[in-house]
Image (cartoon, rainbow, N blue to C red):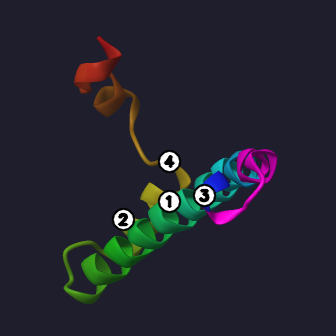
Amino acid sequence: ATAFGLPVEGIAIILGVDRILDMARTFCNVTGNCVAAAVVARWENEISADDLAKRMKEPFSEEELENLEFSK
């Protein structure tokens, strides 16, 4: 930064703000991927409209949560 005449303090501020913006970009990316997966599954008739609506309200049943590896 100093080689280009930029203040080091300014770079630190930009990096601090970029971390928050990066979290927002990640949230948007994950949300978009989830929506796209649901749309394609519905489009390809891999999931019915009723099942999709049920999954949107309650993504996992109690039994499915118990069977997840990371919950053990």
- Closest to the observer: 3 or 50? 3
Query: Of residues 29 and 47, which is closer to you in this image?
Result: 29
Q: Residue at the far bottom: name it.
A: 43
Query: Do residues under tags 2 and 1 come within 8 Å of each other at their CB atoms?
Result: no
Residue tagged 3: 3
Residue 26, disc: none
Q: Please tell me which residue is depicted at 19% across the width and 75% down the height of the picture.
A: 46
Q: Residue at x 39, y 37 (%)?
A: 61
* Disc 4 and disc 3 in contact, CB within 8 angstroms: no
Residue 42 % position (x, y): 30, 81
- Do residues under tags 1 and 3 come within 8 Å of each other at their CB atoms? no
Q: Is residue 59 left or right of residue 45?
A: right
At 26% from the left edge and 26% from the top edge, which residue is drawn? Answer: 68
Magenta region, residue range = 4-13
Height in image: 35 above or below 44?
A: above
| Label 1 sits on residue | 56
> Residue 6: image x %, image y %?
73, 60
Q: CA distance from mark 4 to mark 3?
A: 54 Å
- How many residues crowd mark 3 within 10 Å: few (<14), some (14–19), many (20+)? few
Kindly report the distance in space between the C-alpha atoms of the residues bearing marks 4 and 2: 10 Å
Q: Is residue 62 visible?
A: yes
Q: Earlier in the sequence, mark 4 or mark 2?
A: 2
Q: Quadrant of the N terminus?
A: bottom right
Position of the C terminus by quadrant: top left
Residue linked to disc 2: 51
Callout 2: helix, strand or loop? helix
Q: Are marks 1 and 4 in contact (CB under 8 Å)?
A: no
Q: Is residue 1 visible?
A: no
Residue 38 placement (x, y as % from top left): 36, 73
- Dividing the picture into quadrants, the one containing residue 67 is top left
Reading the image, the residue beneath label 4 is 58
